[in-house]
């Protein structure tokens, strides 16, 4: 890893406008599975049914128990996760003025929990609720999601438990009384207003883009590295598996991001 650490440090310190673009892989070492590949979420729960609202409605009617199990798994995994050294290093880099911000596809809130301030969430945030009527959003306390996880984790959880948990999670909007829902983007839905525009603008201006733990195959989010490259930015990828971006990257680091940044933080004296 040694040569990668030095190469990374050189590139990072020579850039005055660095951004990070992150995906599920950066949270893997926090205990959250990725979407694709072996052991990924979509392997057990196909996105054609579990990745979109109409599909989820069908699963609710036909396989309520399985959906309750899926929800229990997702919610428990989220609330049990805490930031790993990749999240911490990015927060520290921002503090040191070495990173302008993070564009993330993750909904797990771990970048903010680690202390990062400028985080653009392209696919929403599981700890935020959105009113389906007036579109207002509000942050939800972590404790409430912990309670939801506990309800769903009961042995023999059924469809009606799922409904109860959903009501507990997504209560009525305090502004207009409309129904609220998790502010996360399902397949076929639009991205939060403004987030993509701002991401594209930042990507087009950055000098260096760190592409961390993502396959970069889901659009429009995957436009971010494309826009940065087209505008002449250097690309550093950290991912133990090659992606379609690997041959185009200026530096490709084939290690788990948490592992790599744990060593990098030691080297930088940030511990
Ligand atoms: P994927 O599951 O497609 O890809 C995860 C990537 O992380 C893979 O390239 C892995 O090799 C890599 N990886 C795994 N462990 C890693 C580690 N410890 N360090 C670094 N890299 C690691 O996840 P995303 O690219 O984030 O969208 O997926 C993008 C979108 O697809 C998600 O936001 C989600 C999904 O459908 C929606 O739900 C709208």
Image: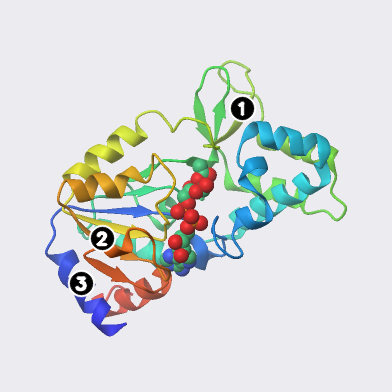
**Relative to 161, residue 211 above or below:** below
Give coordinates of residue 262: x percent, y percent.
37, 75
Q: Residue at x 75, y 45 (%)?
A: 67
Is any atom of residue 83 visible in this view? no
**Relative to 119, residue 35 above or below:** below
The residue singled out by tag 3 in the image is: 9
Q: Nearer the viewer, mark 3 or mark 1?
A: 3
CA–CA distance between discs 3 and 2? 20 Å
Q: Nearer the viewer, mark 1 or mark 2?
A: 2
Lateral position of residue 255 relative to residue 44, left or right:
left
Dot 2 beta carbon under 8 Å from ligand 1: no
CA–CA distance between discs 1 and 2? 42 Å
CA–CA distance between discs 3 and 1? 44 Å
Name the foreground residue: 264 vs 112: 264
Lateral position of residue 106 relative to residue 264, left or right:
right
The label on residue 248 is 2
Q: Residue at x 33, y 48 (%)?
A: 117
**Relative to 78, residue 184 above or below:** above
The quadrant of the picture occupied by the N terminus is bottom left
**Do the residues bearing badges 1 and 2 touch, measured as CB atoms within 8 Å?**
no
The label on residue 180 is 1
Name the foreground residue: 28 vs 243: 243
């Amino acid at each position: 890893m040694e040569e990668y650490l030095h190469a990374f440090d050189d590139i990072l310190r020579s850039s005055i406008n660095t951004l990070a673009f992150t995906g599920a892989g950066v949270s893997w070492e926090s205990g959250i599975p990725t979407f694709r590949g072996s052991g990924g979420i979509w392997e057990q729960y196909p996105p054609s049914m579990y990745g979109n609202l109409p599909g989820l409605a069908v699963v609710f009617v036909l396989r309520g128990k399985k959906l309750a199990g899926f929800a229990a798994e997702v919610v428990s995994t989220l609330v049990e996760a805490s930031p790993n050294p990749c999240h911490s290093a990015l927060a520290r880099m921002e503090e040191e003025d070495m990173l302008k911000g993070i564009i993330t596809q993750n909904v797990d809130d771990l970048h903010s929990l680690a202390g990062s301030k400028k985080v653009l969430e392209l696919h929403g945030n599981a700890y935020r609720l959105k009113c389906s009527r007036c579109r207002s959003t509000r942050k939800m306390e972590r404790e409430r999601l912990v309670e939801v996880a506990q309800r769903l984790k009961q042995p023999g959880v059924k469809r009606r438990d799922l409904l109860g948990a959903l009501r507990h999670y997504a209560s009525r909007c305090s502004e207009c009384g409309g129904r609220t829902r998790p502010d996360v983007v399902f397949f076929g839905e639009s991205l939060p207003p403004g987030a993509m525009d701002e991401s594209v603008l930042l990507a087009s201006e950055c000098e260096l883009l760190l592409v961390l733990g993502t396959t970069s195959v889901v659009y429009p989010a995957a436009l971010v590295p494309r826009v940065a490259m087209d505008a002449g930015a250097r690309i550093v990828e950290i991912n133990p598996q090659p992606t379609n971006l690997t041959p185009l990257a200026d530096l490709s680091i084939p290690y788990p991001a948490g592992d790599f940044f744990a060593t990098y933080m030691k080297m930088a004296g940030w511990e």
